[in-house]
């Protein structure tokens, strides 16, 4: 082998090798400097999550607000549209006293910097503001509009937005207090399903860095909250209405009207654990919108791509990534059951499964 050939081989190997921890740390510091340069040109920031935020969105928003206040010297408020209805999510806010409030409590006109976390422009799943978002941090696939903002960190391999925000806090040499650390830890834990789904090295590293800072008692109270009686009624109805397709290849359920929109993804998450299941799909109506949640065990498909392809023509918003995705579709006078059936058939067709009502998950008289 000639010297030139050896050099080309070395270059090829170095290109295939993963980046070193030092190069990753250096890149994060460089992105932090860019973020702070954008932020310091403003006086007051609104950090906005997607509507009905999950733990990852809540923790990311609070973490970014803390970073902006401490490192950029500007006032920052975290806010959300919709509701926080799932028991674990409500417990997270209550137990940790995280500084996030409904958007209706904030005068959006007073903010000259609008930041989005765990969502992006074009997705359409966050409360609208008069200002155009200028700073976007999200672990979901990048949208074209995000790439035009003054600062963006989107579409990377991280499994949670809390991972990205924690990396910036570390680069800024900021140590979150126990409440924020617990929130960020739970954000990573819940979005990666205990580091078992779509996880990157940065998720593991930040998870381990946060763990000593976590309030373990508070975390237990969040993960094992008390729930209202209607929670059990919703699950009872879900199991009764769930339908199996092609054995246990797929399970679908139309929940009808739901008391909180978060019950839809929670049911989909539970049903995808069915033995032999390739995907689960749940729908439910809340405030004249159809909420859809899709969970995927089949790695040959991409959940986010499939949901966008099927649901975008129906209007509303859709997004997600490899193993999980969701959508919100305005009902606009459409029949809920008929719309759900149409959507179920489209997903079954995408997996080359026969359409139809399927078989009951729980046959009558069993249980």
Image: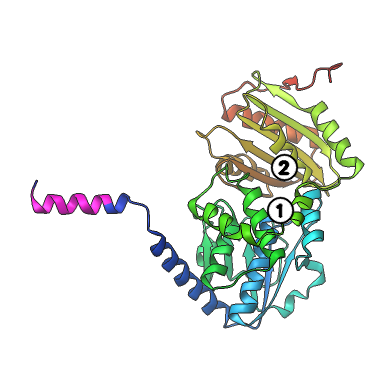
On whether residue 11 falls in the magenta region, the answer is: yes
Specify start and end residues of the magenta stretch as a single range: 2-13
Give yes or no for contact between labels 1 and 2 (Cβ–Cβ under 8 Å).
Answer: yes
**Res 86 seen here:** no
Would you say 358 lies left or right of 325 here?
Answer: right
Going 74% across and 34% down the picture, which residue do you hit? Answer: 340
The residue singled out by tag 1 in the image is 54
Residue 265: mark in rendering: 2
Residue 304: mark in rendering: none
Q: Position of residue 80 (x, y in %)?
A: 74, 62
Local packing at callout 1 (Cα closer than 10 Å; few below 14, some 14-19, many 20+) is many
Between the residue at mark 1 and the residue at mark 2, the CA separation in whole angstroms equals: 10 Å
Going 39% across and 63% down the picture, which residue do you hit? Answer: 23
Q: From the viewer's perspective, is residue 193 above or below residue 55?
A: above
Quadrant for the C terminus in the image: top right
On whether residue 333 falls in the magenta region, the answer is: no
Dot 1 or dot 2: first in sequence order is 1
Question: Residue 99 falls in which quadrant of the image?
Answer: bottom right
Q: From the viewer's perspective, is residue 359 above or below residue 139?
A: above
In this view of the protein, which residue sits in the foreground, 306 or 196? 196
Name, please, the residue furthest toward the left. Answer: 2
Going 64% across and 56% down the picture, which residue do you hit? Answer: 185
């Amino acid at each position: 082998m000639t010297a030139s050939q050896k050099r080309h081989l070395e270059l090829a190997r170095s290109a295939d090798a993963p980046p070193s921890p030092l190069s990753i740390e250096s890149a994060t510091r460089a992105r932090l400097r860019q973020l702070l340069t954008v932020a310091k040109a403003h006086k007051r920031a609104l950090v906005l999550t997607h509507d009905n935020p999950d733990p990852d969105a809540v923790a990311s928003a609070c973490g970014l607000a803390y970073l902006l206040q401490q490192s950029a010297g500007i006032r920052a408020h975290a806010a959300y549209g919709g509701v926080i209805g799932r028991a674990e999510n409500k417990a997270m806010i209550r137990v940790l006293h995280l500084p996030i409030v409904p958007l209706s409590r904030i005068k959006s006109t007073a903010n000259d910097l609008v930041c989005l976390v765990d969502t992006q422009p074009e997705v359409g799943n966050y409360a609208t503001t008069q200002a155009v978002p200028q700073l976007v941090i999200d672990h979901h696939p990048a949208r074209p509009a995000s790439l035009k903002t003054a600062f963006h960190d989107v579409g990377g391999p991280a499994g949670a937005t809390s991972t990205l925000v924690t990396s910036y806090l570390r680069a800024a040499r900021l140590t979150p207090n126990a409440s924020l650390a617990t929130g960020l830890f739970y954000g990573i834990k819940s979005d990666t399903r205990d580091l078992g789904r779509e996880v990157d090295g940065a998720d593991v590293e930040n998870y381990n860095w946060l763990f000593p800072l976590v309030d373990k008692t508070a975390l237990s109270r969040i993960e094992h909250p008390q729930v209202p009686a209607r929670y059990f009624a919703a699950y009872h109805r879900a199991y009764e209405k769930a339908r199996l397709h092609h054995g246990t290849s797929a399970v679908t359920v139309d929940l009808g009207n739901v008391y909180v929109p978060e019950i839809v993804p929670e049911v989909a998450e539970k049903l995808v654990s069915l033995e032999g299941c390739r995907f689960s799909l749940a729908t439910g109506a809340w405030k004249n919108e159809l909420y859809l949640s899709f969970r995927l065990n089949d790695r040959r498909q991409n959940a986010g791509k499939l949901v966008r392809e099927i649901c975008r023509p129906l209007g509303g918003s859709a997004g997600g990534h490899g193993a999980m995705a969701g959508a919100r579709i305005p009902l606009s006078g459409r029949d809920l059951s008929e719309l759900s059936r149409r959507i179920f058939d489209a997903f079954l067709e995408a997996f080359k499964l026969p359409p139809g009502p399927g078989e009951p998950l729980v046959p009558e008289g069993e249980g």
